[in-house]
Structures are given as C-alpha cells and as structure tokens.
Amino acid sequence: MYDKNFIIDTVNNINFLYHIDSKKFFILDNLSLKKYTVGNSINSEMIYKENQNLIIKTTKMDDKFSTFLDTKTIKKLVLIMTNSCNLKCIYCYANGGIYNKKIEFMSESIITKLFSFLKRNKIIINELQFLGGEPLIASNQIETVFNLLEKLEVYPLNISMVTNFTYLPEHIVDLLIKWKVYITVSIDGEKQINDLLRKSHDGSSTYELVKKILHHLGKEEVLYLVQKQPTQKYIKIAEFQNLE
C-alpha cells in the first residue's frame, strides 16, 4: 500500500516502510504495522506524529509522483535483466556492463514480487522495457517475465528491448513475436567501423552476427530499429537498410 508520503509492503514476513521524501527504508514490527495502517490505507499522520525527524518542511511533492497517485500509471518500467554483456566494446564505460561488480541476473523471486505488487495495487504500465548489460543473455529471466505477465493478467501497453542483437536464443523468438516486442538494435555504422569498436570475445564479426539475426527475423513479425551509438567514428548505417 502507498500514499503520497509512504510505501508499506511485507517481503518474506518482514514489514518495510519507505519514506518517499527522505528516500529512507525502515523495518516495522507487527505492532507498529498495525498502528501505522488503517485497513488498506497508511496512517501518515500517526507516522509523522511519532517520527518528527521525517518531516521535511521544504519538500514539495514531485509533480510526476502526484500524477502517478492520480492515474496509477507507470510511464516506463525498465528492467535491468542482467549486468552481463557478451561484447567488449572498446569505448564501454561500464566494463562490459558490470560496472566492476560481480555478474548478476534478475532473480525469479524479484520478478514475481515486482509484478505481484503491480497486480495487487492495480498499477498500469504504459511501457515495459528490457535492458542490460545485454538483456538477451538473460533470456530465461525474460521468459519468466512473459509467463508471469500472462499468469497475473498484467498487460503493458507496449513492450520494448534495447539489444546489441549478436545473440538470440531460439526459444525467445516466439515470445518476441507473441508480445509484439519493439526491438532497438545498436550498431556502430558500417562493418569496418562497427567491428573495430564492437568486439566479440572470440574475434568474430559482430556486424555479421547482427546481420544474420536481422535476416532471420526479416521472415518473422518482429519490429526492430537499427540505432547508431554516439561516437565520432560512425560513417553510415545505410547498408543495413538494404540487407540482401
């Protein structure tokens, strides 16, 4: 449950209170949970009365959050499916997507809790977007998301994905088609420039990998956009507009 001041939720039998203005989390015992809630509503007045330090006099509620409270609609929900990437681009500022941290994938538990929360609170998603790292490395987790969307009857108005498209597991193709996923494919221009900047781990041409997958999906009902990345070394992407 939530209001303009707080979010309260229970995860693994632990009661959490999140104060929106200060961006602080608190753990509540069952007695405090009962005291700070009335039915399915949060008793903000009682929380502030007992916790004066949470009152921030200069804070004005953000207009976007105010709109969210009125509409219960998320404009874009971005899921970072993994921080792992299958390329080693020479300009990558994220050390292959991992930001010098251990490689992780979004767990099934997190996915379930997220969409169960959205379903329980009747929150609408305008756009659901899959990102990484390289999101298609987490194809099993993406499949879990799709299965859960169907099970809970949570239907985003649009679903999109940003990918380097050098890897596409066959089992995910039908799901991309079924859910009409709009795919943005990033490349760095023509083959010579792209392969200079976007390097695979085994030395194979990343340009040719993308081209092969685009050819394959050209026979399917998949929408995709080839998008340039911001670098001075681009020459063109015209060749992709006339794949043979």
Image (cartoon, grey):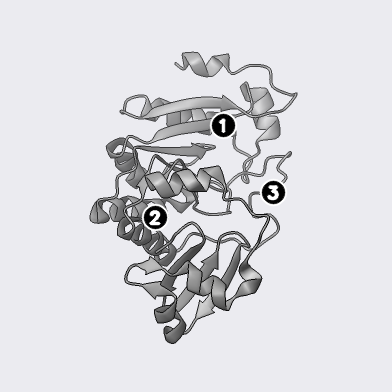
Relative height, residue 205 to residue 190 (above, below): below
Three-letter residue code for mark 3: Ala
Q: Residue at x 52, y 73 (%)?
A: 47
Dot 3: within a 10 Å radius of its alpha carbon, few (fewer than 14), some, or many (20 or more) residues?
A: some
Q: Which residue is drawn at 66% across and 38% down?
A: 199
Check disc 1 and report the residue beneath it.
186
Assign a secondary structure to mark 1.
strand
Left or right of 133 on screen, residue 138: left
Q: Which residue is drawn at 46% across and 53% down?
A: 138
Closer to us: 226 or 112: 112
Three-letter residue code for mark 2: Asn
How far apart are the alpha carbons under marks 1 and 3? Answer: 16 Å
Assign a secondary structure to mark 3.
loop
Tell me residue 205's x, y (percent): 59, 33
How far apart are the alpha carbons under marks 2 and 1? Answer: 22 Å
Closer to us: 203 or 211: 211
Which label belongs to residue 140?
A: 2
Relative height, residue 223 to residue 46 (above, below): above
Assign a secondary structure to mark 2.
helix
Check disc 3 and report the residue beneath it.
94
How far apart are the alpha carbons under marks 2 and 3? Answer: 23 Å
Tell me residue 158's x, y (percent): 37, 36
Which label belongs to residue 158?
A: none
Three-letter residue code for mark 1: Ser
Q: Which of marks 2 and 3 is nearer the N terminus?
A: 3
Could you tell me if residue 13 is visible in this image? no
Could you tell me if residue 106 is visible in this image? yes
CB of mark 2 within 8 Å of CB of mark 3? no
Relative height, residue 140 to residue 67 (above, below): below
Q: Quadrant of the N terminus?
A: bottom left
Tell me residue 244's x, y (percent): 44, 16
